[in-house]
Image (tube, grey):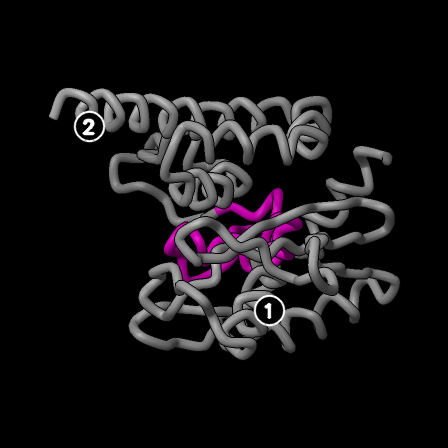
Amino acid sequence: MSNENFKEIWDILSHVDVTGHVEKKGGLSYLSWAWAWGVLMDNYADAEFKFTTYPQADGPDLDVMTYADGSCKVECLVTIRGCKRLMWLPVMDYKNNSIKNPSSRQVSDSKMRCLTKALSLFGLGHFLYAGEDTPPSRPGDVETAEPKNGTAKPSKKSSKKESGIAVTYEVFAQECETMKDLRTWWVDNKEELETLESSQPDHYKAVLDVFTERKKALKEKETQNGSN
């Protein structure tokens, strides 16, 4: 798939202001999936999404993967102009705690949350995951206010924070609670990461830094747990 297609989609969707369509429950913010899909249709009417199903030995395929402790996860694949992004999400309550043996309503809610999160990989509402209230400026938009000393002030943001893609991936990296989770996520999204590396190497470097930091933190955590 053409790298230009990924960039075009990101440039359009990442600058959509979604703040008037954010729902709040339990102190957490969620983007309305219906509105998000409507925005996507306005820009890319041929876009599609599909939820992963899991074969069962004694029954029909299910739309959740169930772990040994009874908790579950869902996965959503979004395709826009042939560009694909896959996102997964645990079935959680509104405090972001995993739910064991979830109801059909809880699974359904998590699937739509997963859909909106998958759309953020294309840029739509990605800044919400970074705790920002408004989308970033478009390329070429600059602040014109003159500094008091007559010289430009350097930005205090790190290169990682300047990458909208990196701050989005940082949220996903923080959801990986073990080294195995982190490795699995990276492998599952290898194709998208390779595309990012070839099309936007600076952003890829920022994303790589995010996962390197998370890897270090998880290694320290596992070391501490092993010594206790």
- Where is residue 59? Give x, y as percent: 71, 63
The image quadrant of residue 224 is: top left
> What residue type is disc 2 on?
Asn
In the image shown, does 85 or 63 lie closer to the viewer? 63
How many marks the image carries: the answer is: 2
- The residue labelled by disc 1 is 112
17 and 23: which one is in front?
A: 23
State which quadrant residue 95 falls in.
Answer: bottom left
Give the mark nearer the N terminus: 1 vs 2. Answer: 1
Q: Residue at coordinates 53% horizontally, 55% vertically from top-left?
A: 66
Q: Position of residue 6 (x, y in %)?
A: 75, 41
Residue 154 pos. (x, y %): 35, 30
Instruction: Work out which quarter of the rendered image holds the C terminus and state it.
Output: top left
Q: Is residue 125 magenta?
A: yes
Q: Secondary structure at mark 1?
A: helix
Q: Mark 2 — residue? A: 225
Q: Is residue 190 visible?
A: yes
* Magenta segment boundaries in residue numbering: 118-142
Residue at 50%, 45% (x, y): give it: 168
Mark 2 surroundings within 10 Å by alpha-carbon count, few (fewer than 14), some (14 through 19), many (20 or more): few
Alpha carbon distance from label 1 to label 2:
35 Å
Q: Main secondary structure of the magenta part?
A: loop
Is there CB contact under 8 Å for labels 1 and 2? no
Question: What kind of element bears circle 2?
Answer: helix
